[in-house]
Image: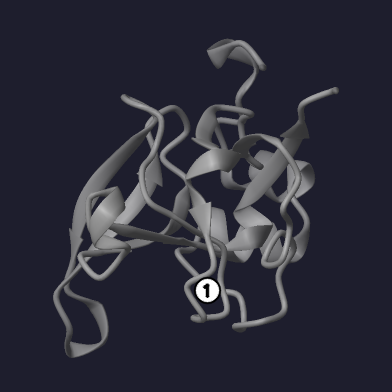
Amino acid sequence: MADLRDLPTTDEEWRQRLTPEQYSVLRKHGTERPFTGPYLESKEDGTYRCAGCGNALFESGTKFESGTGWPSFTEAIPGAVKMIEDRSYGMTRTEVRCARCDGHLGHVFPDGPREAGGMRYCMNGCALDLEKREG
């Protein structure tokens, strides 16, 4: 994971580091089209990290099939994300951002699997990088 001093500090530096889609999502709070992003159907074992800064966000064991078109998780790694009230588009939702670089990841909703706590962290796949576990 990069040192905090290695993180971009300007908009132009973020544009150079990220793909156009990653930039749109992580820095401009965009949303990838459903059923188009990476990791939607991934069942590989590992840790999902922020594509902007490498911060560990979700363990693969918390990923589940939500049918929404985006990778979904029942919980984040403690301290990895922060929640922000989002009142855009005439709705009130809870935005999920990376606690390290403040990148927009997606939203969290209280309609996940009850047996796993009831939360659905609905993430943009392009905002994530999967660090696969060997073995």
Locate residue 50 relative to residue 119 in the image: left or right: right
| Quadrant of image for the C terminus | top right
Q: What is the residue that sits farthest to the right in this orientation?
A: 135
Instruction: Say which element carries label 1.
Output: loop
Q: Position of residue 67 (x, y in %)?
A: 52, 80
Q: How is the image coloured?
A: one colour
Label 1 CA crowd tier, 10 Å (few <14, some 14–19, many 20+):
many
Locate residue 117 relative to residue 102 in the image: left or right: left
Please say if 129 is above or below 6. Answer: below
The residue lying at 76 percent from left, 45 percent from top is: 44
The residue lying at 66 percent from left, 16 percent from top is: 2
Q: Disc 1 marks which amino acid?
A: Thr
| Quadrant of image for the N terminus | top right
The residue lying at 62 percent from left, 39 percent from top is: 48
Q: Position of residue 6 (x, y in %)?
A: 65, 17
**Residue placed under numbered mark 1 in the picture:** 31
Locate residue 90 relative to residue 6 in the image: left or right: left
Image-quadrant location for residue 130: top right
Q: Position of residue 68 (x, y in %)?
A: 49, 81
Q: What is the residue that sits farthest to the bottom in this orientation?
A: 90
Q: Position of residue 101 (x, y in %)?
A: 47, 33
Q: Of 98 and 119, which appears nearest the observer?
A: 119
Q: Of 113 and 36, which appears nearest the observer?
A: 113
The residue lying at 71 percent from left, 66 percent from top is: 41
Please say if 9 is above or below 127. Answer: above
